[in-house]
Image (cartoon, rainbow, N blue to C red):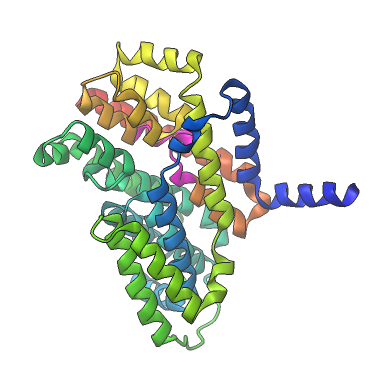
């Protein structure tokens, strides 16, 4: 019995986020018993894309290409603040192409290597948090930058030119806020702990770059996501099957659990009625409040049934990605990555994350209300 208890405790310590998500979801299941609607909670395309990207990034890491990019960044920008700006805005602009979760999966491992290789691990939390804000907000100007944008763009048939204009002010504002936040990072020269020659496995790198392109094409719906899944699995099995062991299956499980959690929350009458009552009065506030309960994508789907005011709804589910950790499921990717490297700093990270994100949310809300 004690062995089982020890295993459970070890699992909880290792997978804090997943453990909390499981407990929260089990509580919601008392209010919403398991039924056939549960199967509709899951965004299967997102889960497939996450798995493929995790597998490909694991392969890319194994080729040492991140170490090479890290060394190149340090050589180009020299100072801590300049390199962190490059990482933040790299995440910001990459989000416009591949969406927030994929942007984080790609850039967070690189960020860790850059900071760890220069003895700057104490800046990992603040950099990760600002990258999360960049990832959640960078793609809000484009229809495909975030999943909630893609849904609303299609649901309301929003003209493309109009879509780009709706969040233009907010997009410029968030970029400015990220620049200001970066000024609080002490600026010093970066020095590598080791300057050994980096050996790249060019053959594997070429293959993983091709797989990476396939993942991007599937995100853009140019290549069917199941086709990409098949190509990634078959290629990795034949060439580098050890990489499957490095896929973060707990992260995939966390997303699955949160899909159930947010789906159930949206079906609890008291919460549903509360949010629905707000949306008739103020779509902007309703969207932001809802994001804090059920995250941004479920909010977009849920509130679209109650309002035709797509401009305010679009703004709300994007700036509503700020705030607490569950307001955007992409934020869980950052938390998981951070805990891999600094598991003892969970409380500190959560406090810093909530404080900074809430401050950004308040400022963005004020800017939105004034424009």
Is residue 229 shown above or below 317? below
Picture coordinates of residue 251, whole percent (x, y):
54, 52
Q: Which residues are magenta?
A: 319-331
Nearest the eye: 103 or 203: 203
- Marks counted in the figure total 0
Residue 268 appears in the picture as rendered = yes
Q: Quadrant of the C terminus?
A: top left
Is residue 189 shown above or below 195? above
State which quadrant residue 225 falls in: bottom left
Residue 355 appears in the picture as rendered = no
Picture coordinates of residue 294, whole percent (x, y):
46, 30
**Residue at screen point 52% across, 44% down:** 256
Picture coordinates of residue 17, whole percent (x, y):
60, 44
Is residue 249 shown above or below 175? below
Picture coordinates of residue 296, whole percent (x, y):
39, 34
**Residue at screen point 51% across, 64% down:** 112
**Residue at screen point 21% across, 22% down:** 309
Residue 86 located within the stretch drawn in magenta = no
Q: Is residue 193 left or right of residue 343?
A: left
**Residue at screen point 22% across, 27% down:** 310
């Amino acid at each position: 019995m004690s062995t089982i208890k020890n295993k459970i405790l070890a699992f909880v310590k290792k997978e804090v986020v997943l453990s909390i998500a499981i407990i929260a979801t089990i509580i919601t299941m008392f209010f919403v018993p398991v039924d056939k609607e549960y199967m509709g909670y899951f965004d299967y395309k997102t889960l497939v894309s996450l798995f493929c990207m995790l597998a490909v990034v694991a392969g890319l890491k194994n080729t040492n290409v991140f170490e090479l990019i890290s060394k190149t960044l340090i050589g180009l920008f020299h100072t801590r603040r300049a390199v962190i700006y490059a990482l933040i805005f790299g995440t910001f602009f990459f989000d416009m192409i591949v969406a927030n979760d994929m942007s984080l999966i790609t850039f967070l491992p690189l960020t860790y290597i850059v900071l760890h290789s220069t003895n700057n691990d104490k800046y990992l939390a603040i950099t990760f948090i600002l990258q999360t804000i960049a990832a959640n907000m960078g793609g809000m100007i484009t229809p495909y930058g975030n999943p909630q944008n893609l849904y609303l763009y299609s649901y309301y048939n929003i003209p493309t030119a109009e879509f780009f204009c709706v969040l233009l002010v907010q997009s410029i504002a968030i970029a400015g806020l990220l620049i200001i936040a970066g000024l609080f990072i002490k600026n010093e020269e970066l020095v590598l702990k080791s300057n050994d020659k980096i050996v790249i496995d060019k053959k594997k790198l070429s293959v993983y770059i091709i797989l990476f392109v396939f993942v991007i094409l599937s995100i853009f719906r140019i290549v069917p996501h199941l086709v990409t899944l098949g190509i990634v699995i078959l290629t990795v099995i034949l060439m580098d099957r050890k990489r499957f062991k490095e896929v973060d299956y707990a992260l995939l499980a966390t997303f699955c659990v949160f899909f159930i959690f947010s789906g159930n929350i949206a079906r609890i009458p008291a919460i549903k009625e509360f949010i629905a009552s707000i949306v008739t009065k103020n779509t902007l506030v309703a969207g932001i409040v809802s994001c804090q309960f059920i995250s941004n994508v479920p909010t977009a789907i849920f509130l679209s049934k109650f309002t035709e005011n797509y401009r305010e709804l679009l703004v709300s589910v994007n700036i509503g990605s700020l705030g607490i950790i569950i307001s955007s499921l992409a934020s869980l990717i950052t938390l998981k990555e951070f805990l891999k490297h600094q598991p003892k700093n969970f409380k500190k990270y959560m406090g810093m994350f909530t404080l900074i994100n809430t401050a950004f949310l308040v400022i963005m809300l004020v800017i939105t209300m004034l424009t």
